[in-house]
Image (cartoon, coloured by chain):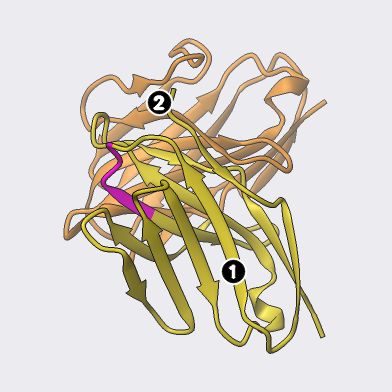
Amino acid sequence: SAVISQKPSRDICQRGTSLTIQCQVDSQVTMMFWYRQQPGQSLTLIATANQGSEATYESGFVIDKFPISRPNLTFSTLTVSNMSPEDSSIYLCSGQLAGAPDTQYFGPGTRLTVL
Amino acid sequence: GESVGLHLPTLSVQEGDNSIINCAYSNSASDYFIWYKQESGKGPQFIIDIRSNMDKRQGQRVTVLLNKTVKHLSLQIAATQPGDSAVYFCAERSSNTGKLIFGQGTTLQVKP
């Protein structure tokens, strides 16, 4: 398995501001993903973070709102831009290990509250 | 469209009993399935997985069964313990896109 950490673990932000969430993996991963989990609900894929190139976004998510970086194999950031209360959610990153390409391992999540 | 769903939103069991959590999926082309456990305030934790060329896989106290004929997946937990209380998600991987699609989750409550 992999150890995946996220920073911050939680934050309370004012509407109109932006927050950048960091994801660090302790092993080399082939794929990294960002998910959103609204309270009491399941996980929804936001995008696939591609190393050295633009992320691949799912329907309903756009780069201007959720810019993503992945400068190397073990690190990625997700920014939630121009936040509104509807962005209040848990944001999770996950990775697929180079040696175990099927399974996704998840970070602990970042709990975001927008006032 | 593709969807993965769970039959029951909440399952309550007595400590020591066996638990069975069910999941239905709709994409017959899915080639890989995973069960995750999510405790309050934490990220999903991998429990067990199964490929579409298998119908059963066992782990420590857990067994996953796959019935491709009816597109049904189940997670069996033997001798359920209070520490098993959590939300359980099934996920399928689309062989078309390689992405995971998550079900809605079942809350398992273990009564002492």
Q: Percent x, y for residue B15?
A: 73, 85
Q: Quadrant of the N terminus of chain A?
A: bottom left
- In the figure, what tint was chain B given? yellow
Q: Residue at image x 69%, y 52%?
A: B8
Instruction: Say which residue label 2 marks.
Output: A68
Q: State whether residue A94 is above or below residue A26.
A: above
Which SS class for mark 1?
A: strand
Q: Main secondary structure of the magenta part?
A: loop
Q: Position of residue A59 (x, y in %)?
A: 45, 15
Looking at the picture, tell me which residue is in the foreground, A62 or B22: B22
For chain A, the rendered hue is orange
Task: Read off the residue under disc 1.
Answer: B20
At 33% from the left and 44% from the top, the residue drawn is A75
Residue range of the region highlighted in magenta in the rendering? B29-33
Above or below A23: residue A88: above
| Residue for point 77% across, 22% down | A85
